[in-house]
Amino acid sequence: MPHATLRARLGVIAATTALSLTGVFAATATASTSSNTVSTSTGSAAATSSARSATASARAARQAARRAKVRIHEAKVHRVLREAARQKGKPYRYGGDGPGSFDCSGLVRYVFMHAVGRVLPHNAAAQYHSVRHIAKSGLQPGDLIFTDNGYISHVGIYAGHHHWWVAPHTGTHVQLQRIYRAHFLYGRVIVWNKRLHHHHS
């Protein structure tokens, strides 16, 4: 075979081989890139899903904690109202702080001490200054209502439905009484929501 023809054939074979190898390398690189892209996408989706799951879990934990606080608060309020009801019919006596007789602040002091272990002063004005002040719009059972005549002269425990537990005055007894018209201030002894701010009404 002439040398020129042999060299020409060898050149064609070399060129064909080079093209084939180039195709293989290109295909391998494309497959590798596609694999990395899929892997990255999968990892990103998994991370997003994990973050959402963590957020949902944290939210559920906060809600559960809040519900637990509400239940504890309601249980304390129930104990306060039950203890107040136990004193029904006991006579009013100025300076009385139980267990046989009470004045208004003596009743409040006795009830909270025995129901929830909270010790309050035996004086209506001092009780007002030792509790959280709230607006009338936020009044709930278990809160305190103070009569303000330019000075705080009287106190009772709000029972709901416009009634309070109170030791009214000499000659009366501890009773669940409908709240009369007067200028009142309001206070809360059992506080579960720390974001509640002080308010004078």
Image (cartoon, rainbow, N blue to C red):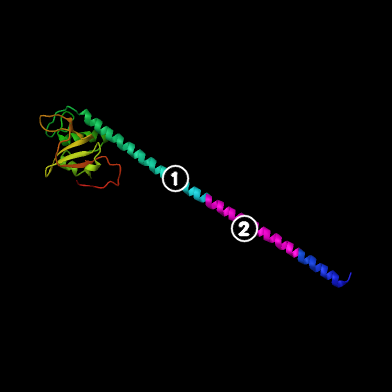
Q: Position of residue 183 (x, y in %)?
A: 15, 42
The furthest residue to the bottom: 4
Q: Which mark is residue 56?
A: 1
**20 is within the stretch colored magenta:** yes
Which is more toward the observer, 114 or 90? 90
Q: In this picture, which residue range is highlighted in magenta?
A: 17-45
Which residue is found at the position 36% from the left and 39% from the top?
67
Q: Earlier in the sequence, mark 1 or mark 2?
A: 2
Which residue is found at the position 62% from the left and 54% from the top?
35
The furthest residue to the left: 171
Q: Position of residue 57 (x, y in %)?
A: 44, 44
Which is more toward the observer, 138 or 166? 138
Residue type for callout 2: Thr
Q: Which mark is residue 73?
A: none
Kindly identify which residue carries mark 2: 33
Which quadrant of the view contains residue 176? top left
Looking at the image, residue 34 lies above or below residue 69? below
